[in-house]
Amino acid sequence: MKRRFSINLWVETEDLPIQSIRVAIERALRPISNRVSTTTIVPLARRTLMIVVPVDQSCAPFVARKSAIIGAWYGGTEIEIYYEGAIHQQNMTFEEKCLHAADRFVTRYPTIARAILPANQLKQIGTYSFNDDGTERQVEITDSVSFMKWIGLPVPTED
């Protein structure tokens, strides 16, 4: 009977090329390599998706205000979005909402919280970056005024 095992190894380095890491791992696996059928070494991927908001509420009336909306280009004129609004009384931060929406996006999770909209109906206000194992996540808001309006915070006025 064959059994399948997965070995996860995290190597944090900035100065070692991936080929050197592969060689070191293959050497470490040599004692058991004749009993292992497949060895795959894949570096973690880092992904960056857009954080967007509707240009006005009529553009996406099905998306609850304060939702995290994660998107990427779909063809040349549309953006595919997944969103998380925490509308069922979950107490989530905006970053947690981004995490849920991005996870749905990447896994193509079947959900009604998905749409493809014309790009002119959405405005990019930032980026959401993460690596495949979820240990590093970053929300970067580049348009704080639009973000504050979307989540319902008062926008400071310039005197």
Image (cartoon, rainbow, N blue to C red):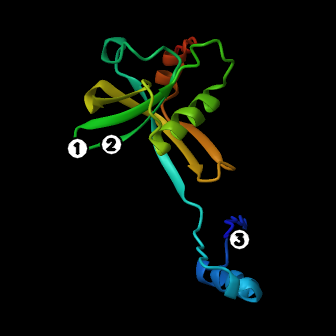
User: Around disc 1, counting alpha carbons within 10 Å, would you say few (fewer than 14), some (14 to 19), or many (20 or more)?
Assistant: few
Residue 118: where, in percent of width, then height? 25, 30
Residue at the farthest front position: 1
In the rendered image of this protein, does residue 94 appear above or below residue 139? Answer: above
Quarter of the image with the N terminus is bottom right
Q: Are marks 1 and 2 in contact (CB under 8 Å)?
A: yes
Is 135 in front, or is 148? 135
Task: Please state which amino acid type lies under the numbered disc 3.
Answer: Thr
Label 1: state its secondary structure: loop
Residue 76 - label:
1
Q: Residues within 10 Å of mark 2 (few under 14, many from 20)?
A: some
Q: Which residue is mark 3?
A: 13
Residue 141: give x, y in percent of width and height.
Answer: 54, 34
Amino acid of disc 2: Trp
Amino acid on which disc 1 is placed: Gly
Query: Who's the residue at 70% across and 80% down the image?
Result: 25
- x, y (%) of residue 108? 44, 41
Q: Is residue 15 above or below residue 69?
A: below
Quickly name the residue at label 2: 73
State how many labels appear: 3
- Measure the C-alpha gap from mark 3 to mark 2: 32 Å
Residue 39 falls in which quadrant of the image? Answer: bottom right
Q: Secondary structure at mark 2?
A: strand
Name the residue nearer the viewer: 150 or 36.
36
- Give the mark nearer the N terminus: 3 vs 1: 3
